[in-house]
C-alpha cells in the first residue's frame, strides 16, 4: 500500500509537468457558418437561398510557439459556392500574432492583399471556471467578452497549453483558445486536433501592399457602397469578420 501511495503522486507530478511544456504545436480549427441565417431578413437575397448550402465549413491551421503564432486557411469541404459578402474568400488571409511584443501583422483580403500591422487587441475577458468541456482531448474552461462595442464572443481555452492565443486575433486568456462562437456572425471555430510537433517556421507575412487600419476601414466602406443601397447593412459584419 505504501508503494501505491508513492507511485500515484509521482505519476500525477509527471503528467502535470508534461502539460506545462505544451508550448509549441499545430492546431486545426473547423470554422462552421450558418449561411442561411446570414441572409434572413433580406428579401432580395431569398432568391439565392436554395443555391447555397445552409452550412459552410472550412479548416484553418494555427502554428504556435510560446510567444508567437500564425493562423492560415487550410482547406474546405464545401462542394458548392457559398455566401461571399462577409469579406470574400479567406484563402490568402493570414493572422500573425506576437504575444511577447503585443503586436500583430495580418494579410487582409479586399480587392487585393494588404498588410496591416498594429497592437494586439486588449481584450477584457470574463471567466467561468466551473463551465468546462473537452475539446480535441483537452480540458477547457469558458470565457466571454464583447468586441466592437456589441459583438459577444464566447470562447473555451485550455490551461494545458499555456499560450495566450487562439484563432484570428483572439488573445489574452491564460491558455490556448480551442473553441470560439460569435452568434452575430453565425459562426463557430472548434479545434479538431492538436499536434504537439515542432511548428513550421513562424514569421510575419511580408507579401502585400501596406495599409493602416484606418485605410482598411475606408476600403471596406467603399466596398460596401458597391453593393448598392443594401451594402450598409453588411458593413458592420464585414468589419467584424476582418478584424476579429
Image (tube, rainbow, N blue to C red):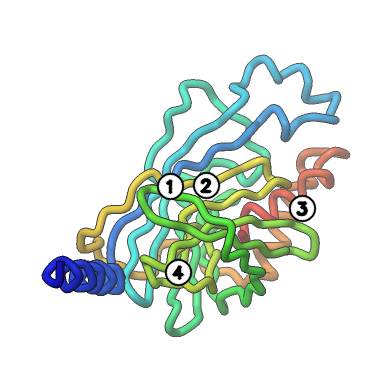
Query: Circle 3 sits on which residue?
Result: 236
- Identify the secondary structure beneath mark 3: helix
Gap between marks 1 and 4 measured at Cα: 16 Å
Is disc 1 in contact with disc 2, using a CB cutoff of under 8 Å?
yes
Query: Circle 1 sits on which residue?
Result: 29
Q: Which of marks 3 and 1 is nearer the N terminus?
A: 1
Query: Circle 4 sits on which residue?
Result: 175
Gap between marks 2 and 4 measured at Cα: 16 Å
Position above or below: 58 against 162: above
| Label 3 packing within 10 angstroms: few (<14), some (14-19), many (20+) | some
Viewer-nearest residue: 6 or 116: 6
| Label 2 packing within 10 angstroms: few (<14), some (14-19), many (20+) | many
- Identify the secondary structure beneath mark 2: strand
Count of numbered badges drawn on the protein: 4
Position above or below: 113 against 82: below
Position above or below: 235 against 4: above
Gap between marks 1 and 2 measured at Cα: 6 Å
Q: Which of marks 2 and 3 is nearer the N terminus?
A: 2
Q: Earlier in the sequence, mark 4 or mark 3?
A: 4
Q: What residue sits 73% from the left and 62% below the top?
A: 218
Q: What residue sits 38% from the left and 73% below the top?
A: 68
Q: Which mark is residue 189?
A: 2
Amino acid at each position: 500500500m505504501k508503494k501505491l501511495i508513492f507511485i500515484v503522486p509521482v505519476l500525477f507530478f509527471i503528467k502535470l509537468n508534461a502539460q506545462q511544456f505544451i508550448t509549441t504545436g499545430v492546431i486545426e480549427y473547423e470554422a462552421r457558418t450558418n449561411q442561411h441565417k446570414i441572409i434572413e431578413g433580406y428579401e432580395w437575397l431569398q432568391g439565392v437561398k436554395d443555391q447555397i448550402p445552409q452550412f459552410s465549413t472550412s479548416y484553418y491551421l494555427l502554428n504556435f510557439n510560446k510567444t508567437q503564432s500564425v493562423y492560415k486557411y487550410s482547406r474546405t469541404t464545401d462542394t458548392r459556392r457559398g455566401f461571399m459578402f462577409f469579406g470574400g474568400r479567406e484563402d490568402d488571409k493570414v493572422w500573425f500574432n506576437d504575444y511577447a511584443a503585443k503586436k500583430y501583422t495580418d494579410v487582409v483580403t479586399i480587392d487585393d492583399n494588404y498588410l496591416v500591422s498594429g497592437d494586439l487587441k486588449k481584450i477584457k475577458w470574463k471567466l467561468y471556471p466551473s463551465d468546462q468541456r473537452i475539446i480535441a482531448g483537452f480540458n477547457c474552461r469558458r470565457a466571454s467578452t464583447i468586441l466592437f462595442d456589441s459583438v459577444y464572443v464566447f470562447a473555451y481555452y485550455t490551461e494545458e497549453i499555456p499560450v495566450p492565443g487562439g484563432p484570428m486575433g483572439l488573445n489574452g486568456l491564460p491558455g490556448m483558445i480551442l473553441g470560439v462562437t460569435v452568434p452575430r456572425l453565425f459562426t463557430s471555430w472548434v479545434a479538431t486536433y492538436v499536434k504537439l510537433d515542432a511548428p513550421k517556421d513562424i514569421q510575419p507575412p511580408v507579401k502585400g501592399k501596406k495599409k493602416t487600419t484606418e485605410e482598411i476601414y475606408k476600403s471596406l466602406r467603399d466596398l460596401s457602397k458597391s453593393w448598392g443601397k443594401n451594402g450598409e447593412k453588411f458593413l458592420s459584419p464585414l468589419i467584424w469578420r476582418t478584424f476579429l
